[in-house]
Amino acid sequence: MVMKGIPLEAGKPKLAVKLVREQWLDHAAVRRQFSNESQIVRELQHPSLPKFCGRGLIGQQAYYAYEFIEGFPLIHLSQEQGRFPPSLVRQMAPSLVRQLLEQLHHLHSGLKPVVHGDISSENILIDPRQKLYLVDFGCAHFLRQANKESYQWIAKPSFISPEQARGESWDQRSDLYQAGILFYELLLGRRWNVGHSKRDKVLFAAATQRQADDFLCPEISPAISAIVAKLLDPDPDGRFSSAQDALKALEGV
């Protein structure tokens, strides 16, 4: 649960305050993951990632705070929301995905590599300058400290990767798959995962097949289509090995 906070001192930035919901206070695994999340956010050092401001307790309720980001969720760019012309969103898509991949490269290649695990159009904010901010690290884990419990925190069903859907371990390539879903939806203005219920969406992700490189043609250029197809490969080994590799491919089109 995220709330907007008011700074106690004049001139200080507005805050976003995330708390553990009361109904989860007695769940040890939830408390451990929330503590892990706040530690991850505390160590982030990137202008397009949340800037940590502090953490503590309100009674028995744990919280952490970061600087409030002025923007709206990227989901409002989708054709289904109807707020922006599809042609404009399609034109913006490569630039937006490039920003996301730069943020993922930073997360995946730091001294303590982090996997986000829950990239979606709801967890990315865009400001009036078209700058992206990746938020909500509730599923994230330090890659080198991952254990069986780390992998139980998975993405929103519409953005779940095949390995997450199958209950397998997942790494930075799962983030790339989710980036591929985002790219697809920005380009075409429709959902990648067509399941209706949560169960249907998980089954869709687990059973998805490799797409031909030109599967988005003729609506989308062959080069862009091939990049999206590689990001969406159901086999992690078939995807780009890193966000940096995906960036290089995108810069070449």
Image (cartoon, rainbow, N blue to C red):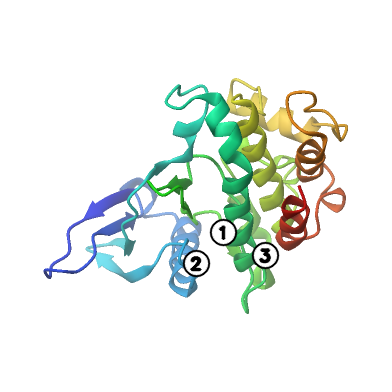
Q: Which residue is the site of mark 3?
A: 147
Q: In the image, which is nearer the foreground, mark 2 or mark 1? A: 1
Mark seen at residue 140 = 1
Q: Earlier in the sequence, mark 3 or mark 1?
A: 1
Where residue 188 sits in the image (x, y, percent)?
64, 26
Q: Are marks 2 and 1 in contact (CB under 8 Å)?
A: yes
- Residue at image x 77%, y 60%? 245
Residue beneath label 2, please? 36
Residue at horizontal 53 percent and vertical 31 percent from the top: 88
Q: Is residue 8 left or right of residue 232?
A: left
- The amino acid at mark 2 is Asn
Q: Nearer the viewer, mark 3 or mark 1?
A: 1
> Which element type, helix, strand or loop, lies under badge 2?
helix
Disc nearer the start of the sequence (3/2): 2
The percent position of residue 184, horizontal first and vertical second, equals 67, 34
- Say which label, 2 or 1, has the lower sequence index: 2
From the image, state whether disc 3 or disc 2 is nearer to you.
2
Tell me if label 3 and label 1 are in contact, CB under 8 Å: no
